[in-house]
Image (spheres, rainbow, N blue to C red):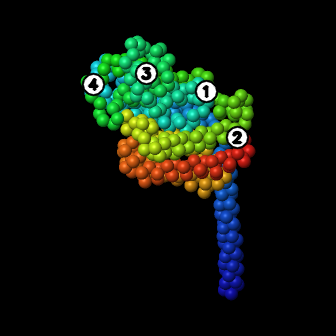
């Protein structure tokens, strides 16, 4: 009996020792797995950003997608304008007005990348010169010229494009009566809208693979691109595009009419669409930074986050704050520049903060980086 008890004790001690060894092995193994998983996640995070992917997504997921949307909306605007000319009813006028506003959205968002063909081919001023001169527009209407598409295409930039169409469709925020639109105005409206559609198609094709394919010059920066000798040069172009529109919104579009209390300097003054325009300009910055328009690609935010996560989070918050602060300005903007000056100044400050972060933090970060 005593021998049997000793054997059992030995067995129990051996079993306990074995369990302890197994426990240590499991704990050690779990720790190793966690560390390996963390290392793997770190490697994936590090490898997630690839400059070539970002540039390709910028060119196609953001720029080409925006210009394609713009061209599609311009086509819908032209269809609505032609329908208005054929049947000048109040319903058709309101459809044309809505189509004009819908076309403004992708255009204003595209102003965060006003470089490349939109600049070199003179498409920006042809599409969106402002403020328009009422006298010059009226002189076209009062002339004996036949208002064909070719004739309108040869006019000054301030006598065609978005804001000429706006002038003909709207009347300073008040709902225009379709019965007040003259045959001459309808002729001008159809021709200048056709001219605008020609420009949006030209712009889309300038970036598209089936056209001049400027997008490939961006996507292939540093690898045979004749325009961008390095990826760094292309990324700096992206950042400078965002800086340019932030500066224009803060120090031009909002500040000029605000500082001078002059409603004639207000963009989209006839449609009372100014605040939406300004917000879409900043949404354009958001699109470029995040690498998304309709689809979601790889954006500059992933690069910034890999270098300085705090900066990335701060800038994203600043951009959204600028959009929201502009949206808080009471409509119409033309009245707010005198009646709600504190709200307008808050919007200027918010957009200026976006510009400052781009200039002082993000651009230097890009300039100091070696891209793959």
User: Quick one: SS at disc 4?
Assistant: helix
Figure check: 321 above or below 246: below
Could you tell me which residue is drawn at 66 percent across and 30 percent down? 217
Name the mark nearer the viewer: 1 or 4: 4
Q: Residues within 10 Å of mark 4 (few under 14, many from 20)?
A: few
- 223 to the left or right of 108: right
Q: Which residue is mark 4?
A: 180
Name the mark nearer the viewer: 4 or 3: 4
Q: Tell me, for residue 232, which label it has, or none.
A: 2
User: Quick one: SS at disc 2?
Assistant: helix
Q: Nearer the viewer, residue 308 or 351?
A: 351
Could you tell me which residue is drawn at 53 percent across and 44 percent down? 251
Q: Tell me, for residue 120, which label it has, or none.
A: 1
Q: Which residue is mark 3?
A: 192
Figure check: 164 above or below 20: above
Separation of marks 2 and 4 at Cα, in angstroms: 55 Å
User: x, y (%) of residue 156?
Assistant: 49, 22
Q: Tell me, for residue 107, which label it has, or none.
A: none
Question: Which comes sooner in the sequence, label 2 or label 1?
Answer: 1
- 234 to the left or right of 128: right
């Amino acid at each position: 009996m005593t021998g049997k008890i000793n054997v059992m004790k030995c067995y129990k001690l051996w079993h306990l020792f074995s369990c302890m060894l197994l426990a240590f092995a499991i704990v050690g193994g779990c720790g190793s797995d966690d560390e390996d998983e963390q290392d793997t996640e770190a490697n994936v995070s590090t490898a997630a950003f690839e400059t070539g992917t970002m540039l390709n997504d910028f060119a196609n997921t953001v720029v080409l997608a925006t210009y394609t949307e713009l061209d599609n909306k311009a086509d819908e605007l032209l269809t609505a304008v032609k329908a208005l000319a054929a049947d000048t009813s109040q319903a058709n006028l309101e459809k044309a007005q809505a189509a004009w506003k819908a076309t403004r959205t992708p255009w204003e968002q595209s102003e965060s990348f006003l470089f490349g063909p939109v600049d070199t081919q003179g498409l920006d001023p042809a599409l969106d010169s402002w403020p328009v001169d009422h006298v010059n527009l009226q002189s076209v209407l009062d002339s004996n010229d036949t208002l064909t598409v070719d004739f309108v295409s040869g006019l000054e930039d301030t006598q065609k494009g978005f804001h000429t169409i706006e002038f003909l469709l709207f009347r300073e925020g008040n709902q225009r009566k379709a019965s007040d639109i003259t045959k001459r105005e309808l002729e001008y409206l159809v021709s200048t809208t056709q001219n605008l559609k020609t420009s949006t198609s030209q712009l889309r094709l300038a970036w598209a693979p089936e056209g001049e394919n400027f997008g490939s010059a961006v996507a292939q920066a540093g690898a045979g691109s004749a325009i961008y000798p390095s990826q760094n040069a292309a990324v700096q172009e992206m950042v400078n595009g965002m800086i340019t529109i932030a500066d224009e919104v803060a120090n031009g579009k909002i500040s000029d009419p605000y500082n001078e209390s002059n409603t004639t300097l207000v963009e989209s003054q006839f449609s009372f669409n100014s605040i939406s325009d300004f917000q879409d300009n900043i949404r354009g910055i958001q699109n470029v930074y995040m690498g998304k328009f309709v689809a979601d690609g790889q954006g500059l935010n992933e690069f910034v986050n890999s270098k300085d996560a705090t900066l990335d989070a701060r800038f994203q918050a600043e951009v959204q704050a600028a959009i929201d602060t502009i949206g808080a300005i009471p409509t119409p903007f033309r009245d707010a520049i005198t009646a709600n000056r504190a709200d307008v100044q808050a919007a200027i400050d918010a957009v200026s903060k976006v510009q400052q972060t781009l200039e002082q933090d993000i651009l230097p970060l890009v300039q100091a980086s070696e891209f793959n």
